[in-house]
Image (spheres, rainbow, N blue to C red):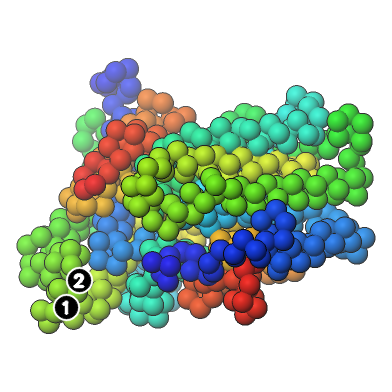
Amino acid sequence: MSDTAITAGALPAPKAENAVAWGFSRAQFAALTAMIVFLAVAPFVLYPVFIMKLLCFALFALAFNLLIGYVGLLSFGHAAYFGMGGYIAGYSAKALGLSPELAILAGGIVAGVLGAAFGWVAIRRQGIYFAMITLALAQMVYFFCVQAPFTGGEDGIQAIPRGSLLGVVPLDRDMAMYWLVAGIFLGAFLLIHRIVHSPFGQVLKAIRENEPRTISLGYKTDHYKLVAFILSTALAGIAGAVKSLVFGIATLTDVHWSMSGEVVLMTLVGGLGTTFGPVIGAAVIVTMQNYLAELGAWVTVIQGVIFVACVLAFRRGIIGEVGNLLKVKL
Amino acid sequence: MEDFFGIPAPLLFGQLLLGLINGAFYAMLSLGLAVIFGLLNIVNMAHGALFMMGAFVAWLLLDKLGLGYWWALLLSPFIVGAFGVLLEKLFISRLYKLDHLYGLLLTFGLALVIEGVFRNEFGSSGLPYRIPPELSGSWDLEFMFLPIYRAWVVAFALVACLATWLVIEKTRLGAYLRAATENAPLVQAFGVNVPRMVTLTYGAGVALAALGGVLAAPIYSVNPQMGSNLIIVVFAVVVIGGMGSILGAVLTGFGLGIVEGMTKVFYPEASATVIFVIMVIVLLARPAGLFGRA
């Protein structure tokens, strides 16, 4: 099974003695350190808003990877939660005047509640049906967002204020906003790592490898899948919420099915079921979109070609290939 | 002028007809998806893009070669079907030993490429395609005007679906196909060239999508997005019907088209989402789908 499964790139779990701290292996710990150093230095070298965009998509891809990489569920409708998180955060910050931390929290909670409802329906089917159902449900959210008055239709919600963190720290300066975004990203990254390496996460991986066997061992796999789905959607909502505060705008682009495809692509390019893959994948795709923006519709073609190339020749993704080369799990 | 439930008859029957037309496309597309899925075990995410390609090939045949609607109806499915055969040979056939989700991801990538190329070439705004003179005009049925082309689309789609059903259920080729769907290695052991059959099945499913595209060209404007918006609804139709039965796919397609049309009359706000809502209800009541086998 492990040869053909969707996470063929994943190597066996590192032995316990390899773990340095918090379940990170030596190699992962080195990569984590490098990532933290990058987060600390990047805003002084690169354009902070660009790094913030990158981190929002990295968080989105990490949330998506929690499902595909560790439970083996391909959700093709994650844009619904990402976009809805953005709309709710934008609406609460602008129309309700909530502070940014509450607006982000609201975005995450609403996305999680939506995920609970949709997950409850979707986990009744597996595999490709799960993908088609989540895609269809997300399209329903898209049509809802086109019609609902609070989303502003085609215009979206514009001029969303960043406000002041806890009412004390104004976030209008990009650097202030950056540290908040970096903090949320790192917190969520560690949270996902903790979830994956908890006993709960072990059951998720067991479901990915062989669901009937997991059921026969006495686990109510539906409950585990639903909780994983809710966690993933809530985190996707937080990613969307942060993005709408960073850019001050929430639009239909973020709930469209092409956004669902993009997060799949990011995770696939980085490496399904790897710890750092989604971050690298998001960085690659966002940077590519940034530099190729003037090519217009060719960007879609290039993304499609990358999809095809990844599936045919490159299923481990960047991080999976690097890990395989270095004989470590990243 | 007669009224039904306080709705004027022309409006009611007009929407019923529109619903039937949408249903015709749902039926043809979900039929192709079901046949492909049955044998290849992949969800063809490129189905919408190939439907769009069918319409564009019809437009190109007219614009570049001066070949009209009837030629397009014949040639476009062949051309797009041949393109499908090429896709299967080059890409999809490499994935049969892998998890089914990879097939979905690959065909999604192919859909992005096809759609992107057409958007670069022809822009996002639609191109007009005229109704052939033989089918223009409309019949006066007293309670409504029936545009002849729309009646033609519904009738032609029904015949195409019925023909597909006959081929699969009543011919020797169809028997091979059904047998290979159940157990491909065994059929191969009997000396049937299963890989070639798989390739041709993909081509045939794709040709059916292209045929739908040609039928759709005079109704909708020919534009690169015409497939992707439709295909997501078709996925919901497939989930509702279940991919187990050919007639099931056809009935579900037409039925849901009518339901969608009626929703436009009685509660227009929900017309875009009604099929998804039905999908949720069906999943809660009968997870395998109306005609599916668990």
A39 or B226: nearer the viewer: A39
Discs 1 and 2 carry the same chain letter:
yes
Q: Chain of mark 1?
A: B
Most foreground residue, B210 or A318: A318
> Which label number is shown at residue B68?
none
The chain carrying label 2 is: B
Q: What's under tag 1, amino acid-wise? A: Gln
Badge 1 vs badge 2, beta-carbon distance below 8 Å: yes
Q: Quadrant of residue A170?
A: top right
Categorize mark 1 by other alpha carbons within 10 Å: few (<14), some (14-19), many (20+): some
Please tell me whether residue A176 is drawn above or below residue A89 in the rendered image: below
Q: Residue at x 62, y 61 (%)?
A: A16
> Where residue A50 sits in the image (x, y, percent)?
80, 58
Furthest toward the top, the residue is B6
Image quadrant in which you'd find residue A91: top right
Whole-Å distance between the Cαs marked 1 and 2? 6 Å
Residue named by callout 2:
B184
Whether residue B175 is visible: yes
Q: Is residue A3 above or below residue A199?
A: below
Looking at the image, which is closer to me, A129 or A41?
A: A41
